Image: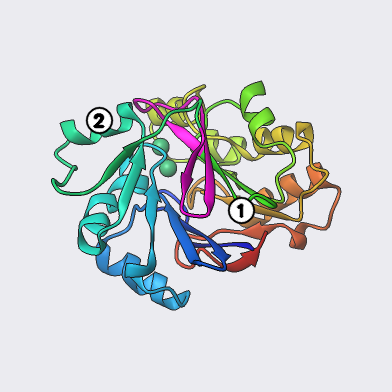
Amino acid sequence: MLRFASLASGSGGNCLIAEVRASAGATRVLIDCGLKLTETERRLERLGVAPAAVTGILVTHEHGDHASGVFDFAAAHRVAVYLTHGTLAAMRQEGKVTDGVRIVIVDGRQSVAVGDIQVHPFTVPHDSREPVQYVVSDGASRLGVLTDIGTPTAHVAACLARCDALVLECNHDLDMLWSGAYPKWLKQRIAGPFGHLDNGGAEQLLAALDRSRLRHVIAAHLSQQNNRPELARAALARAMGCEADWIGLATQDEGFGWREA
Ligand SMILES: [Zn+2]
Ligand SMILES: [Zn+2]
């Protein structure tokens, strides 16, 4: 059984947990850890997970909202860190890598097993060194997580096909972004091909996917300045042909509670 929850989602910090229970015990991975150590521990305990019961952290890229807490948590709880060569190099340059932590290099072409969880990294266009996003599976159900992507690609759509659950970036509403208070360079970066996915882009991507198995769709990484939950939900609901309140929401303060994929 694969279940998942979010500790936090947004530019203030991202962290998601996926858990697979098998007869031999449970495997748990975090996808990103962009919260302070004590905050990560507090939110894990809120979900009923002892921090030491985490098996590994899958890192998508080096941006602080995804990676700032990775090595503190890994060192404190003896957890392995999975990341690409490029992400590791960028984090080394910033002095964010702690000695003594077990590191496993991943890339966008090869799947890797973490205990009973099958991990499929895939490459995405985003303004970081070597970003990936992840599909995780227990062999029966698949959870796809996609945030921090400037442009949906055919490769991404193929990787996310036939997922049972999707956590999908709805970063901004384009009109709110362009009419908002951000400086022009930042607006261009966010809306650019290596920036973030807007509600309309997320809707188009979702509409183009093989959704035949999809039972959970959750809007994630919403900008607090440039988006509103009801806009993100409405966009994904249009792609699904469902009611807007069926679409889940990952929030900055709460994430979302456990769901079974
Ligand atoms: Zn981010
Ligand atoms: Zn990013």
Question: Of helix, strand and loop, which one carries label 2?
Answer: helix
Determine whether 206 is above or below 80 in the image.
above
Q: Is residue 216 visible?
A: yes
Q: Is residue 214 left or right of residue 145?
A: right
Amino acid type of the residue that numbered disc 1 sits on in the rendered structure: Asp
Compare residues 24 and 3 and report the one nearer the observer: 24
* Residue located at (61% from left, 53% from top): 138
Q: Residues within 10 Å of mark 1 (few under 14, many from 20)?
A: many
Q: Position of residue 61 (x, y in %)?
A: 37, 36
Q: Quadrant of residue 96?
A: top left
Compare residues 33 and 24 and report the one nearer the observer: 24
Determine whether 236 is above or below 85 in the image.
below
Magenta span contains residue 125: yes
Compare residues 25 and 73 and report the one nearer the observer: 25
Q: State which mark lies toward you, 2 or 1.
A: 1
Cα distance between the residues tagged 2 and 1: 31 Å
Compare residues 19 and 69 and report the one nearer the observer: 19
Q: Quadrant of residue 50?
A: bottom left
User: Does label 2 or label 1 sit earlier along the sequence?
Assistant: 2
Q: How many badges with numbers are in the image?
A: 2
How is this picture coloured? rainbow
Q: Are marks 2 and 1 in contact (CB under 8 Å)?
A: no
Bounds of the magenta segment: 111-133
Residue topped by disc 1: 138
Q: Is residue 153 visible?
A: no
Q: Position of residue 59 (x, y in %)?
A: 38, 43
Q: Position of residue 100 (x, y in %)?
A: 15, 48
Q: Which mark is residue 90?
A: 2
* Residue located at (28% from left, 54% from top): 69
